[in-house]
Image (cartoon, rainbow, N blue to C red):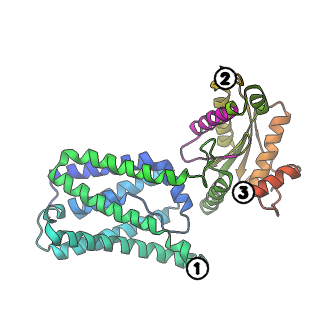
Amino acid sequence: MSSITARDWLWFGLLALAAVVHLEAARGLERVREVTAEGSPHTHLQSVWFFAALLLLPPPLVAGILLISYVHSWLRVYRRRALVHRKVFSAATVVLALAGAYLVLAAIFPTHTEPFAVTLSGPLGLVAVVVAGFIYWLVNYALVVGVILLTNPDRPARKVLGRASDQLMIAGAIGLGTGMAIVMISQPWWTPLLIVTVLALHTGLLLPQFRDASRTDAKTGLFEPTFWAELTNDELDRARRLQGTLGLLLVDLDHFKRVNDGYGHLAGDIVLRAVAEAIKHSVRGHDMVGRYGGEEFAIVLPGLGADDACEAAERVRAAIAELAVTVPDLDGETQVIRGLTASVGAAVYPDHGTERTSLLLAADAALYDAKTEGRDRVRIAEAVRPSLPSARRSQEWIRLGLVRDDADKVS
């Protein structure tokens, strides 16, 4: 196509808006998926908009969609905490993949003057989309896997190759992108319906993957201890690479036994769920909140230093103090529980520890200070902590996989 038309700009605007809305709606989920996919190919449904753009737009505008998606992702999903060269490489692999798919389509339809979506018809159109989609997937996948193998020679091949279900996601994204392009050509008013469909499929199919019993606590919906520990390790690795910081909070409800004894364990479970929701709404969308068991919670705050971590801890403490939770008491009567308080211990990488174990111990020592000083307060760890948690508590952490039995001393 020799020039960019007003129609091209309209389609460009719609696809760019759809890509941004998609990332905004799923950024919390994508943040967790990207962290858990460390060391293996990370797939996402932005390919829907990329492939639709390939079929609808001139190459410069296709590149524009890609640029908007990756810049928005770096700013909003990864909060500028991703390694820039890795994101540039990722974008480059997609550019090369789209270029390969474009060459396939141009070879099959060498005289096209309209967008490819207009010329796709009959068996030949189907073959063109299938071959172009295959090339798009193969180029991107081969480049990503190749670099992972080169930079992680000791990593098991099974981990490097990723899951087959993730590659099926790309196939689905290509199919949805093709459908999106054809609908925008033939029935443009149906476009919002397809955009909603993509969002629903993304959140509806992937959210349960991160809310199953092996990853989340049944009572609160927060990350369970072992999965939270894995996420924490990945975030610490990221902080080391970026030479950044990371905050860790331990939150313990004060006198929670009084709730269970006075109102019953059913009421206690309701209070725990309310507290979990209050904590999640008090921190950022990409902060990672887990439950340790009992009435204790743990929060990872990527990119925060000591002052910001303390501010976050104060927000959590204040949000819990403001709760009014309606529960049934032991007689079945409705009661409202108010006046809940929590003690919070904070530690920061690298000031108070360089490993998960040392950070947990430092935060726990600060939590102990908050408890002994009267509860309902926040305390930050000291640079050097002479005391460690009790043997019983340490053994419980070892059982949950939160610390090692050869735990590093707090630095």
| 327 lies above or below 84 | above
Kindly identify the amino acid type of the residue bearing the numbered disc 1.
Answer: Pro
247 or 269: nearer the eye?
A: 269
Q: Is the magenta stretch mostly helix, strand or loop?
A: helix
SS of the residue at dot 1?
Answer: loop
Q: Residue 7's spot in the image, x, y percent?
A: 16, 51
Q: Quadrant of the C terminus?
A: bottom right
In the image: residue 270, left or right of residue 33: right
Q: Which of marks 1 and 3 is nearer the N terminus?
A: 1
Q: Residue drawn at (80%, 43%), measured in percent from left and top?
A: 366
Provide the residue designation for mark 1.
153
Tally the marks: 3
Q: Residue drawn at (55%, 48%), measured in percent from left and top?
A: 286
Kindly identify the amino acid type of the residue bearing the numbered disc 3.
Answer: Arg
In the image: residue 133, left or right of residue 229: left
Residue extent of the magenta highlight? 268-292
Label 1 to label 2: alpha-carbon separation: 61 Å
Disc 3 or disc 2, which is closer to the eye? Answer: 2
Q: Residue drawn at (34%, 67%), measured in percent from left and top?
A: 95
Q: Residue 28's spot in the image, x, y percent?
A: 50, 48
Provide the residue designation for mark 2.
332
Provide the residue designation for mark 3.
356
Is residue 87 in the magenta section? no
